[in-house]
Image (cartoon, rainbow, N blue to C red):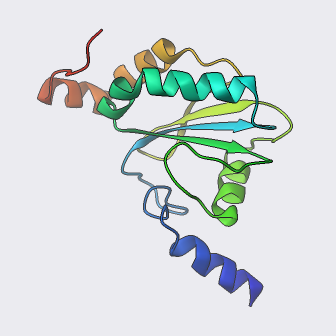
C-alpha cells in the first residue's frame, strides 16, 4: 500500500510531466545538480543559471538543483519520491557534487562535479543532431 501511495504521488506531482519516470523521451533537456547542502557551489550554480537563462531556455533546458538539506530546485517543487528516483537513476550521491546533462531521449550525455562550465554544456548540446535541427529552424534570440 505504501508503494502504491508513493507511486501515485509521483505520477500526480506537478513535475511528473517534466521528469517522466519510465518514459524513453523527455520533452526537454535537463541539467541535474546534486549537492550535499546549500552552499557556495550551489549559490554559484544558481547565479550562473540566471546569467545564462536565455541560452538555457533557448536550448529547451530545465535546471534542477537537489540538496539533502533543502531539496531545493530552481524551477518549482518536486516530491521526495521524484528526488529519490532521479538520484538513483543517475547514481548521484548527496555526499558529493554531481551534475548530469540529460538529453531529450532521457539518457545521460555528460557528467561533472561542483564547477559548471556552461559554455562547454552549451557546446555539447549544440553538437547534438536534434539541437542542430532546432538551430536551423529558429535562429538564436540570445545576445552573446
Q: Is residue 119 visible?
A: yes
Q: Is residue 128 visible?
A: no
Q: Residue at x 63, y 64 (%)?
A: 79
Could you say where residue 113 lies in the image, as x and y percent from the top left?
71, 23
Q: Residue at x 67, y 17 (%)?
A: 115
Q: Quick check: 105 above or below 130? A: below
Q: Quick check: 53 above or below 78? A: above
User: Residue reaching furthest right?
Assistant: 95
Label count reads 0
Q: Residue at x 44, y 20 (%)?
A: 51
Could you tell me which quadrant the N terminus lies in? bottom right
Could you tell me which quadrant the C terminus lies in? top left
Q: Residue at x 39, y 28 (%)?
A: 53
Front-most of residues 90 and 41: 41
Q: For this view, does 59 lie left or right of residue 17? A: left
Q: For this view, does 42 lie left or right of residue 29? A: right
Could you say where residue 57 lies in the image, as x and y percent from the top left?
34, 34
User: Residue reaching furthest bottom?
Assistant: 1
Q: Quick check: 81 above or below 118? A: below
Could you say where residue 104 lies in the image, as x and y percent from the top left?
41, 43
Could you say where residue 29 lies in the image, as x and y percent from the top left?
43, 40
Residue 134 occupies which quadrant of the picture? top left
Q: Quick check: 41 above or below 84? A: above
Front-most of residues 134 and 41: 41
Q: For this view, does 125 lie left or right of residue 130? A: right
Amino acid at each position: 500500500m505504501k508503494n502504491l501511495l508513493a507511486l501515485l504521488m509521483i505520477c500526480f506531482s506537478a513535475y511528473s510531466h517534466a521528469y517522466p519516470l519510465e518514459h524513453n523521451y523527455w520533452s526537454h533537456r535537463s541539467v541535474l545538480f546534486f549537492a550535499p547542502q546549500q552552499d557556495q557551489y550551489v549559490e554559484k550554480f544558481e547565479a550562473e543559471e540566471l546569467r545564462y537563462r536565455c541560452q538555457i531556455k533557448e536550448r529547451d533546458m530545465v535546471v534542477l538543483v537537489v540538496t539533502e538539506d533543502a531539496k531545493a530546485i530552481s524551477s518549482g517543487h518536486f516530491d521526495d519520491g521524484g528526488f529519490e528516483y532521479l538520484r538513483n537513476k543517475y547514481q548521484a550521491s548527496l555526499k558529493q557534487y554531481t551534475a548530469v546533462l540529460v538529453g531529450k531521449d532521457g539518457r545521460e550525455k555528460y557528467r561533472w562535479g561542483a564547477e559548471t562550465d556552461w559554455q562547454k554544456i552549451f557546446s555539447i548540446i549544440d553538437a547534438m543532431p536534434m539541437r542542430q535541427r532546432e538551430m536551423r529552424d529558429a535562429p538564436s534570440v540570445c545576445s552573446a
